Amino acid sequence: MSEAVKEPSMLLQKEMIAKNYDAITSKHQSGRKVSSTFVPGNLNELLASFGILNNLPEINAIQNGMRKLSGDYILEAEKSGHSEDVCTYVKADIGMMGKGNIAPNGKPFPDPDVLLLSYTGCYTFMKWFELLREEYKCPTLMLHVPYEGDGHSTKNMRDYIVSQLKEVIIPGLEQVSGVKFDIDRLREALRNSAKAEDDLVWVLEQGKRTPSPIDAYFGGVYYIGPIFTAFRGTPEAIAYYQALRKEVQARIDAGVGPVTPDGSNFSDQKYRLVVEGPPNWTSFRDFWKMFYDEGAVVVASSYTKVGGMYDLGFRHDPDHPLESLADYCLGCYTNRNLPTRVDILTKYVEDYQADGLLINSIKSCNSFSAGQLMIMKEVERRTSKPGAFIETDLVDPRYFSAANVKNRLESYFQMIEQKRRGAARAA
Amino acid sequence: MRCFIGIDLGSTTTKAVVMDENLDVLGRGITNSRSNYDTAAAVSKQEALIDTRLTLFRRALASVPSVAGEVDTILADLERNFRHIQFLEQLEDLERTAIANIKGPRFAGRERAVVDVLEETFRRLRAQSAALFIPGARRKSDFFRDLAGSDFMHVGETVCREAGLGFDVILNVYDKSILEVENRPPAGDMEGKFIRALEKGTMDAGAIAEPVRAALAIPLEETYVVGTGYGRVRLPFPKEHIRSEILCHGLGAHMMYPGTRTVLDIGGQDTKGIQVDAAGIVENFQMNDRCAAGCGRYLGYIADEMNMGLHELGPLAMASTKQVRINSTCTVFAGAELRDRLALGEKREDILAGLHRAIILRAMSILSRAGGVKDQFTFTGGVAKNEAAVRELRKLIKENYGDVEININPDSIYTGALGAATFAVRAVVN
């Protein structure tokens, strides 16, 4: 396969990520502290206000998946006793440690100074950090975020999170960093966050156009990169989203679709999909190709909301810093209950004029995959648009069966086409 | 005449259906998929065209008063003679190929002896081949590989023994050559072979020669071909001629039974649950994921484990008096369970009944995922031919969904190809 064509914003992001890895791996020279934390509910602005760098194990697993390293890492983790059924992000991370813990820049990851578990909707996170604590013997801070089991958060939940921030997280980070908490520094970062979030939402909402100038899944995972990871709250993220917005605007002006890895604009869009579930990372490009080769563009996805549901109106708020961090954690997509997920996905199918909902269910993710078939059926019922269900995995290359996935996708697209013709005949 | 052809390239067999523009099925053909889909597609298509010729003969003979009531016998005779001619032609090809393959150091110095043995073997095979095509001849398979193969084994062995030569020498040549022959596109001149078959026949050619020749003179024009199945990307035609097998099975089931709303297809490597609307348009589907346990190949594996033919499993399971429970959904583990139960003294038929139930239980879970079973329910695919599987399915459908009309067509293995042929007609006619 030829080298993937990257857009300028992708290259900019690549540089940002590379710089962050360099900052992490040179912590002994710079004297900066490093935390390990997860994407959903991450407290990047708070960490940054203490000057702490942010290293995200899931992102490392994704990087290793895309760089075709995760397969070996998973085998390594299985050798050390982790079952075949365990989340493959966890195994890719544990296996990476077993194989020298080398960062994408080729240098070894330093041990973290603190493990910040700021979100608990995924219980695997908790077990994962138990393993990491065992390995690194460093302080662990846990922010318990109550699950929105009733479909909404309450004042009580918010207060509970704010009090944990005040009583546990902030004092803990002060101790690790040796820096006194400065609420104005936090406010400044939150102000930056909100600016970038505005631009991100603008970009994601362009999926409502025809043709869509974005792919909200395969392209979307790039668009969310900076805001979901170590850059939320930084001026770099603001600049990134301004650049991205310009890029998308240029495509709108030219009336063309998103750029595919082959370098062409994908404008001949026959099918518009909403996708639920993360992409497969080990065969990312092949997976994407199965869509655009058949004329399918993703106009909205839930995966691009796991690190925050900004499109539903939430913004980080410098005037209510701790409360807005609490609201942010509560509102992540993965913290929503099944009926709310159905509501959100139904709304996406309608608002984005999609032909249907496709679910990519993750073999090794028990918590998030549960209930997805019911979600699909309910969204089908409400929208009268056909759904489809495929199964792959995050970063375990053994669970991507290309022939089957392709077969399923092609059948789905042809089914949409056939239904359209049927409807046209009936009319 | 205009012919519309659907080809279903399955993992085990490749099927073709020929239709006319009125959506009437003219012919069906099937062959083993081999490792060569191009040839499988060509062979199945040719088989369906041969079957189409037979349909045309039947139509032509219908207007001949003197043969009234004998048409079936005449056509059966004609087909047997045709098959025999075709068999001899392929046997000749096999002999030529085998002799050409006698080269290299392993034959050094004894080339002549090996050629002699092969020639003698093929001479005897030709001499006894007529028996394969007499009325009522029983056979395990109609595929050339199976027909020629089993006879080659025992005739070849005898000839080798008589000549004082190791059988392995020619067995090796045979293995290599049968692959080459099987993967060669089929020979043409179908019409010529039918004429020879007519001349060779025991029937009175006087009354039928004219109508048969007239039917042979009708050109079969390949107006539009649609391909489906796992091998569909290998088909040498453009993308718009290719449909997913989900759509083809849904439409095929609708063509067989227009009241169909749910389709279960159990094929070689996948099990599909499909919901269709009143027009045969697919509304929803689910398939097995990541694992093909419980599909047709599962039975193939079990048949091998029990040293039986695939088609013998169902009848034996029907003879069971109690059902042995088989839990494994993994094909290989089910094989282990099978041996375990045999060792415990359970009867083969009872174990087989349990295995058939295990397959249908897997299918039931896929049907649930696809939204359950609605009236009418059509069961298709190779496994629908297995009476023990059908018995379990009927039971479980009744238990879970109550009284549902269950359709099983004797030609259900052609469902995908039938749907594809229908798409071909629609592409041109509508």
Image (tube, coloured by chain):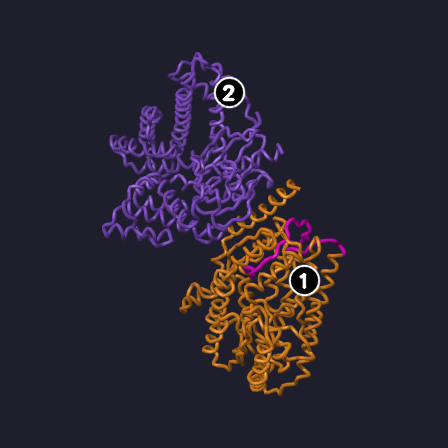
Chain B as rendered: colour: purple
Q: Which residues are magenta?
A: A253-280
| Relative side of A232 to A251, left or right | left
Disc 1 residue crowd, few under 14, some 14–19, many 20+, Cα 10 Å = many
The residue singled out by tag 2 in the image is B216
As drawn, the residue found furthest toward the top would be: B206
Label 2 element class: helix
Provide residue B401's location: percent of width, then percent of height. 44, 49
* Display colour for chain A: orange
User: Does residue A259 belong to the magenta stretch?
Assistant: yes
Q: Main secondary structure of the magenta part?
A: loop
As measured in the structure, the alpha-carbon distance from the residue carrying label 2 to the one carrying label 1 is 64 Å
Q: Chain of mark 1?
A: A
Residue drawn at the location 43% of the way across and 33% of the way down: B181
Secondary element under disc 1, as helix, strand or loop, is: helix
Which residue is most to the right?
A253
Viewer-nearest residue: A235 or A1: A235
Q: Are marks 2 and 1 on the same chain?
A: no
Q: Which one is in front, B154 or A157?
A: A157
Q: Is residue B27 magenta?
A: no
* Labelled disc at residue A204: 1
The amino acid on which the numbered mark 2 sits, given as a three-letter code, is Leu
Neighbour tally class for label 2: few under 14, some 14-19, many 20 plus, Cα within 10 Å: some
**Quadrant assignment, res A195:** bottom right
Q: Are marks 2 and 1 in contact (CB under 8 Å)?
A: no
Placement of B57 over or under A62, stated as above or below: above
Q: Quadrant of the C terminus of chain A?
A: top right
